[in-house]
Image: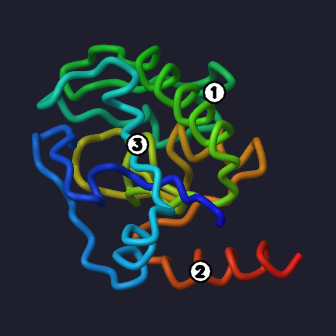
Amino acid sequence: MERILVSACLMGRKVRYDGSAKTSGDALLAAWRRQGRLVPFCPEVEGGLPVPRPAAEIEGGAGGAAVLSGAARVLTAGGTDVTAAFLTGAQAALAVARSFDVKVAILKEGSPSCGSLTVYDGTFTGRRVPGHGVTSALLELHGITVFGEDRIAEAAARLREIDES
């Protein structure tokens, strides 16, 4: 049975920056949860950030790969550099994913950690730009396919491909 790394906030855990959850009502996710396939994880909390915490964005909307390479930082609206916590959390997510032989992750879209298609642009104005969060970028670099919570059907198709190979 393939295990799936999933953002803890999608499972109802109140770990988001504002102390809330973003619980998903997706039927497939619920079925996988009942089957024991899900591995909930919050890279920001595991990286040492508190709940609640100031919102953070990748400067210039550069994306997770730029953070991983040292070309960009993750900053709060007040200018505090929280890059180290995001990098630590990403490494912890990768370690957990490897320990469960995870090949697919379903993470919170738009997050500076978990975004798989978009991240906020670094201006704290709510504008999104194409790109990966730090954790998503690291997981993808290591062969783990990342999907946002609005692409669960695509994740299911990928899991079927893995099962058939």
Tell me if 51 is positioned left or right of 89 in this view. Answer: left
Tell me which corner region of the image, top left, top right, bottom left or bottom right, holds residue 48. Answer: top left
User: Which of the two discs, 1 and 3, sits closer to the camera?
Assistant: 3
- The earlier-in-sequence mark between 1 and 3 is 3
State the image coordinates of residue 134 (x, y, percent, origin top left): 53, 37
Helix, strand or loop under label 1: helix
For residue 156, which numbered disc appears in the image?
2
Q: Residue at x 52, y 23 (%)?
A: 87
Q: Residue at x 43, y 51 (%)?
A: 119
State the image coordinates of residue 81 (x, y, percent, origin top left): 35, 15
Helix, strand or loop under label 2: helix
Q: Amino acid at mark 3?
A: Phe
Q: Residues within 10 Å of mark 1 (few under 14, many from 20)?
A: some
Q: Residue at x 65, y 64 (%)?
A: 2
Tell me if 51 is positioned left or right of 112 in this view. Answer: left
Return the residue at label 1: 68
Q: Amino acid at mark 2?
A: Ala
Q: Quadrant of the C terminus?
A: bottom right
Tell me if 103 is positioned left or right of 61 in this view. Answer: right
For residue 41, which numbered disc appears in the image?
3
As measured in the structure, the alpha-carbon distance from the residue carrying label 2 to the one carrying label 3 is: 19 Å
State the image coordinates of residue 61 (x, y, percent, origin top left): 47, 43
